[in-house]
Every structure is written in structure tokens, then in C-alpha cells.
Image (cartoon, helix red, strand yellow):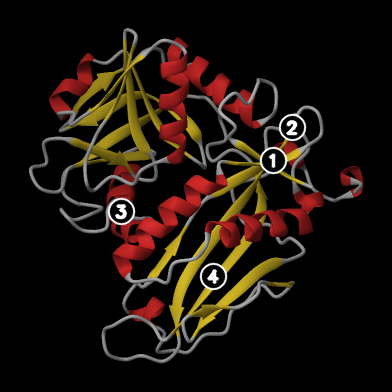
Amino acid sequence: MNRKNMNIDWANLPFGYFKTDSNIRFYHRDGKWSQGELTSDENISIHMAAPCLHYGQEAFEGMKAFETKDGRIVIFRPSENWKRLQKTSERIFLPPMPEEMFVEAVKKVVAANKKYVPPYGTGASLYIRPFLIGVGAKVGLGPAPEYIFAVFVTPVGPYYKGGLTPVKAMVITDFDRAAPDGVGDCKVGGNYAAGLPGADHAKHHGYPVPLFLDPKEKKYVDEFGTSNFIAIKGDTYFTPSSKSILPSITNDSLRIIAADLGMKIEQRPISIDEVSTFDEVGAVGTAAVITPICGINYNGKEMLFGPEEKAGPVITKLYQNLTGIQYGELEDKFNWLEEVR
């Protein structure tokens, strides 16, 4: 594995698709999963009447692999992604899969594409995208007759090029990304498609990040377009509780780290009117880890959080602790890293 000879500018990778050597696929037919097959084919052939295309019977996950300071290749908390995928599968009638099958599939694809894991110190990582889709011909509404579970990987740079650089957000009141008692807490594509108008509205007004409110009362903070909402006030870490928020593994990890650092944790409904009282605000998720939010526009008035030039001290410390574990710079005291050999 000679990464120096690969024609990749590791330090300037975008957060986008980069072709790698192989992906893995499993097929579910007659109630059984097939053995996983590695392939170099980037295309999937499915019937035009596949339920994933017409009725949204599909789910996906997002996770990362890293090269650590001591040269190991590790995956961050893959079992938590498996748990979340199972919850989504139950909700939209996708077939369950064993945890071992999911984790081993991810490890097998990462191992087959080791040369694409960005070297330690570049700030980049290997993004992992497992997805599960309903296929086969079915015109009437109902679960698909067959399913495909696949995993591909691609080396990526930071989601936002500035890294831990604050950005501004805009509260979206004209659009919802999820419905009450719907699938907002599941990782399905429809949630992201529903969030596109709000994201476009925010971007049109000069704000790179949309912040959605609860879909019922438009009173409580839900989540950012692709990330959970967190806030810091004194020694307390706040994050909203809602049935329409996707449970973020990054958010869960940060709460554990915050508690380990002696902070108090409050997960509860957060009114948009309370947001202005916070010291620091961040958008957290797998892609960006933490994006500091220095200002939020709500109905034309801007709430400000710290300087625009740099993240606040607590968010910076949380970011350093989480990425320090991921890159092997700090002790993995919570046993979050799964090594790929």
C-alpha cells in the first residue's frame, strides 16, 4: 500500500464521490440473505417498478474509517449504525439483518479499499455509505419482493472546507423536513429531499445552514438540515428531544464525552425563544463532526453566539476530544473503535 504514489491530493479532498476499487452487495430473496459479493461495478440494475423508486422503501447510513496516529485503520462505532438501521428497517418494513453481517460487510469493504483511507494528519477520512433498498417489480403499495444491501466507500475531506470555522444558520418556518409521528427519526432519503426547499431558501438568503422547527407547533428546535442541534450554556450541554429528530451517533458520542468531562447533560424540548440564551451552538453529525454556529436568523432578527472567526472554547474541546479518539491521539476509553486488519 503506497499512498504516496496515488494521484490523490489528500489535504484538499472535497466531500464528494471518488471512485474506489470495490463495493459489497447482499441480496435478500425468499426471506434469506445471500453471501456478500465484492464487485468493482459502480452501477446497480433494478426493475423500473422497484418500490425504492416509487414508494421510498429505502434506508441508508453514514459512517467513517480513519488511519490512526499509530498506523491502524479503524471504524467509528459501526454497531451504533447497525442499531439505527434496524430501527429504520422496522419502521418502513425492510428486512432485518444480523449485526455481524452489517459490521463484517463494512470491515470487508474498508479492507478491500485500504489504499483509499486518507493518511493520518491530512484531516480527511474514508466515508462509508451502507444502504438498503427494496427492489423487484411491485406496482401496488407494499413491501418489496426482494432487497439489496450494499456498502460503498469514498475518501472525503471536511464537509465544510473551513473545518471548525463558524457559519450562520437561518430558521425555516415555511417548510418542514419531517411530519409528526412520521419518519423524522429514521435515516430515509425522503427526509433529506423534504429538507431541500428549506436549505435552498436559507442559501438564497446567504445562510449555508437551515434550522428546522418542530412540524407541529413551529415552536421548538428540531434539527439543522443534515445535523443535530447542540448548545452550551455554562457547564451544561443541551440538545433537543423530539420524535422527528434523527438520533445522531455523533451527538450521542459528544454527550458521553461531555459527561466524562464533568458537564451536565440536558436533552429536552428547546423553545426557539430560549436559543438566544446559549453561549455556544453547534451542528453535529458524521459528515462535519461539529460545525460551530455563530449566528441564527429567526424572523429577520439575528441571534449571535461568540466570535465569527473561531469556535467557542467548549465546542472546540468537545471536537478535539472526539476527533482525538477517532485518530488515535487520545485513549479510546469508551471502546468505540473497530480495527480493520
Secondary structure at badge 3 equals: loop
- Relative placement, left or right, of 115 versus 206 is right
Q: Which mark sits nearer the N-terminus, 2 or 1?
A: 2
User: In which quarter of the view is residue 248 placed?
Assistant: top left
Residue 74 - label: 1
Instruction: Compare marks 3 and 2 and give the one earlier in the sequence.
Output: 2
Label 4 vs 3, first from the N-terminus: 4
Along the viewing direction, whichever of 216 and 176 lies nearer the viewer = 216
Type of residue at label 4? Phe
* Label number found at residue 195: 3
Q: Nearer the viewer, mark 4 or mark 3?
A: 4
Horizontally, residue 294 falls left or right of residue 45, namely left
Q: Quadrant of residue 274?
A: top left
Q: Depth-wise, is mark 3 or mark 2 nearer the camera? A: 2
Marked residue nearer the N-terminal end (4 or 1): 1
Q: At 41% from the left edge and 10% from the top edge, which residue is drawn? A: 262
